[in-house]
Structures are given as structure tokens and as C-alpha cells.
Amino acid sequence: MAASTHTVTNQAPPLVGYDVFAADRALGEAVVRHLDPELLEGAREELSALGRTTGSAQVQEWGALANENPPKLRTHDRYGNRIDEVDFHPSWHRLLGKGVSAGLTSAWTRPGGHVRRAAAFVVWTQAEAGNGCPLSMTHAAVPALRTDPALAAEWEPRLTATVYDQELRPAAQKAGVLFGMGMTEKQGGSDVRANTTEARPLAEDGTYALTGHKWFCSAPMSDGFLVLAQAPGGLTCFLVPRVLEDGTRNVFRIQRLKDKLGNRSNASGEVEFDGTWARRVGEEGRGVRTIIGMVAATRVDCVLGSASLMRQAVAQAIHHCTYREAFGGRLVDKPLMRNVLADLALESEAATTLAMRLAAAYDDGSEQERAFLRLAVPAAKYWVTKRCTPVAVEALECLGGNGYVEESGMPRLLRESPLNSVWEGAGNVQALDVLRALRREPGALDAYLREVGRARGADHRLDGAIKNLLTELADLNGIEARARRLVERIALVLQGSLLVRYAPPEVADVFCASRLGGDWGTGFGTLPHSLDLATVVERARPVA
């Protein structure tokens, strides 16, 4: 018999056995808003099915096991043959297989595909963020390959398939493949034009032998990779297959796997090319322009991934505070804790709403929407990913000491939280990309202003923020040094515009008062107390 001192009371039950999609009101409303009504019923059914799977005890265990058992590199087999393979725990393969079968690599092939995939990405990566990397890379490779119709015809059906095949063999023998990417090198980092990997033309037209290295190669266990290398005509994009058509392994030497802060379940490696066979994608000397479509799509996934992580962190915090009692009542009912939770919920909803708007622009595909994305993607990537870590920290604190232990899952969220800010260009890269769009593509600013202008007159604080932003944009003095401040305002005004148009009045009111009106402190939990914070918290509460 257990001692009476060990009776467990006043502990929140685990947040498990619920529909992750249905419990996210902001996400569900975004799907309704952006999807063709004819597609809505089917999309809701598949997203709810994925939501129930994500919220299940089994899948949550898969996520934990995949992180507790990170990938291992095997450079040689037992006989001494070089194989360069990455071994994963079975839970990783289950997660990745489910992500592929759920359509997270097939947005380009079905109506409303980007909105449906974006919502599924937000849902699924709440179970385990690491498998989002190969799913994202595979999805994002499509626009780059489309610059070469012959390559696209060969590879796109495999990339967009809903079949996961983990075996390394010729791509022509597989129903579905995964892709990775290799751009950065030791000496250059984000300055990819400083790459030194050499591409030497071979006899067959469009084929090359690569020699060099990649300091960061995403998803090195994949079937193919898009990489940048210096051809005779300049920096060029190449497709590197992992296994050649005759079944032999391409030269793809994985030197080591990165020992990362978070994202532990996923492999990131350093690779060496030594006469590695490759096919050119696009024209010589236009490598950045060719691969930029992949970069843009993965940046959207950075926004989606951060929105996903924020949503899970906030859901855990509100769930805990709903059940936990202290100082004579439930934590969620305490005015100060309610202020903290409302602030976190507001950040999460603003991130989700903006991320889904980007996905909808991809589905639209019009010239105006493409111009809008040119400015909105780097601005959103800069701001939303930077908000992720403080949200994770504050949400963890809501659980107190319970949140600081591994079993809660909150430390894993915290370690993951900085990733999307670093991946695909850190903050300065995004800020400079926004400046580049402003200088070179006036249509991007016009499209952005049309978007935020749709909410003009609905809230005086938003109107004032738009006016102030225009003043900042008119002053080019010292523009680079203040680029971060400018990009932050661009993102906040866009979020405010979207929330004023689409969110409940209580949510939009608090956002405009705090983020745009200046009635806010420097930390979470400093919202104006006179506003309806209880409604904001209740809207974000996950109903298990």
C-alpha cells in the first residue's frame, strides 16, 4: 500500500486523446476562410483525422522516442565498404511515413493544396517537429525543379507521392522519394555566392562532376538533393541523386551528423563531394535564381513550424492552468495568470493567421499574390520565428517546475524554438531581403499596402500604425541599420490587419491595443487589464 504522503493531487491530466485540429479555432477558421467551399468538407475530415492521430497517446510516444533515440551515422558496413547511411529509430520512420501519407509533400498536385497542407503541417509537427524538415524540403523542391520541365516531369510525381519508402535504391524504382538541400559551406554560411564547390561538365549534356563540401546538408538520408556549386558559367543549381540509375551509390560522403541544440530526431550533416555525379537544374550562373523558389517555400514552412510550436506550447500552458489550483482557485481564473495566457494566446493566433494567409497566396498564384509573397514571406519569417522562443519560455514557466522536467515535453519545445529563426536565413538575412524587395520590386510594396489597406478604418490604432509605417518607408536614411525595426513593423501591421478583418473583436482589440497601440510592457502578461482577456484565453483552450 502506498504511503499517504504519496497521494497525487492537484496535477493536470496529460493533454492527450484529442483532435489537435478541431481544438485550434484560429486554424480551423483560417481553413474555412481560405479554402473553396466545395473542398471544405473533405479537407475538414482529413484534417480532423490527422488531428486525432496527432493527439493520440501512440503518436505522442513516437515523438518522445524519436527524440530520445537520435539518428546515428554509419559510414561503413561490417566489411569495410563505404555506405554513408543514417540509422533512425523506428518511431522516426512511423512519423515520417504518416506525414508523407497525410499529403505534406503533395500540395502542388491538388486544388487548395497549399492551404490544406499548411494546416496539416501546423497540426502534424505539434507531435514532433523534426520530421517537418524532410517533409518541407521535399515539398519545396518542386518549384526549383519546375525550371527544368524534363527534370520536373521525371521527379515531381515521386516527390508529391503519398508513399514513404525508406530504402536507398534508384529513384526510378521507388513510388515516392524525399529530398534534401545543401547550400551553405564553411567559409561562406549565408553568403552562398562564396561557395567553392566545383562543378566540372561531363560528356553527357547537362551532367557534371562535383567536388567540394557542404557545411550543412539538410536531411542527408534523402533520395536526392538540390545543391549549389560553381560551374564554368558561375554559381549553378544541381540535382544530386543519392543512388545512380545503375544501382551504385553516388559519391556522397557524410562526414558527421550535427550535434544540435534541438531538432534532435532529425539528421543534419556535413557532406563531401568527390567526383559526385549531378544534373544541372536551370542555366549555368543562375543557381540562386533557380533555387530561390525552394528557399521561399521552406521559409513559409519556417513560419508554419513556429506557429505549430507556439500553438502546442500555448495549448499545454492553458491546459495546465485550467486544472491546476493555487491560492484558492484555478490558475486560469487568476487575473495575473489570465493576462499571461491571453498574451501568449494572442501571439499564437497572430502567427497562425499570418502563416495561413501566406499559404493561401500560394494557392491563388496570381501576379499580385506573388508580389505580396515577395515582401510578406521574409517579413513573416523574420518576426514569427523570433517570437517563438519567448513564447516557449513563458509557456514553460506557466507549468512552473513541472514544465522544467523532460517528461512534460516543454523542454523539447524550448530547444526546438530557435530553429526556424536560424534555418533558411537568420534574422539579418530576412531583414536585408525585405529591403531588397522594397528597392527592386515596387510591386511587392504595392501588394502589401493593398493587403493591409483592406482593414483601414476598422481600428484607429491600426490606422495609426499604417501611417507611421509609411513615414518610416519614406525615410531611407540609415535604412540598413534600422532594417530589423522596419521589418518588425511590417509584420505587426500585417498581423493586425488580418486579425481586425478575421478574428473575433476581443482578439483584434487586444492585439491592436498592445502590439500597435503601445499599451503593453516588455514581457508577456502586460496587456491592458480592462480588456476582455478571459475570452481570448477561452478561445485558445484545447478541448481534449
Image (cartoon, grey):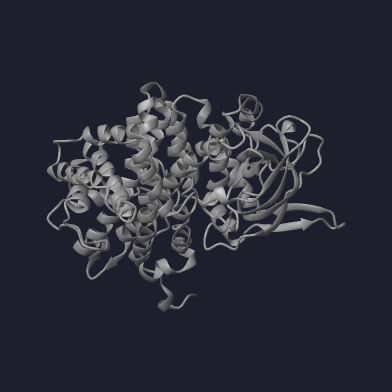
Q: Residue furthest right?
A: 79
Q: Residue 307: in sight, yes or no?
A: no
Vertical comparison of 470 with 533: above or below? above
List x then y, in percent, for residue 228.
61, 44
Residue visible at 35% across and 61% down in the picture: 390
For this view, does 391 lie left or right of residue 498? right
Question: Could you tell me which residue is drawn at 58 percent across and 48 percent down?
Answer: 183
Give whichever of 107, 430 is nearer the camera.
430
Task: Using the rendered view, name the quadrant where residue 163 is placed.
Answer: top right
Task: Name the residue located 42 percent from the left edge and 50 percent from the top edge.
Answer: 306
Of residues 506 and 149, the one drawn nearer to the viewer in this rendering: 149
Pick the residue in front: 448 or 193: 193
- Front residue of 187/516: it is 187
Whether residue 245 sits left or right of residue 439 in the image: it is right
Residue 105 in picture, x, y percent from top left: 55, 36
Counting from the top left corner in percent of width and height, residue 529 is at 15, 58
Residue 259 visible: yes
User: Height in image: 408 above or below 361?
Assistant: below
Side (left or right) of 243 relative to 504:
right
Outermost residue toward the top in this view: 38
The number of discs equals 0
- Residue 268 position in % (x across, y down): 61, 54
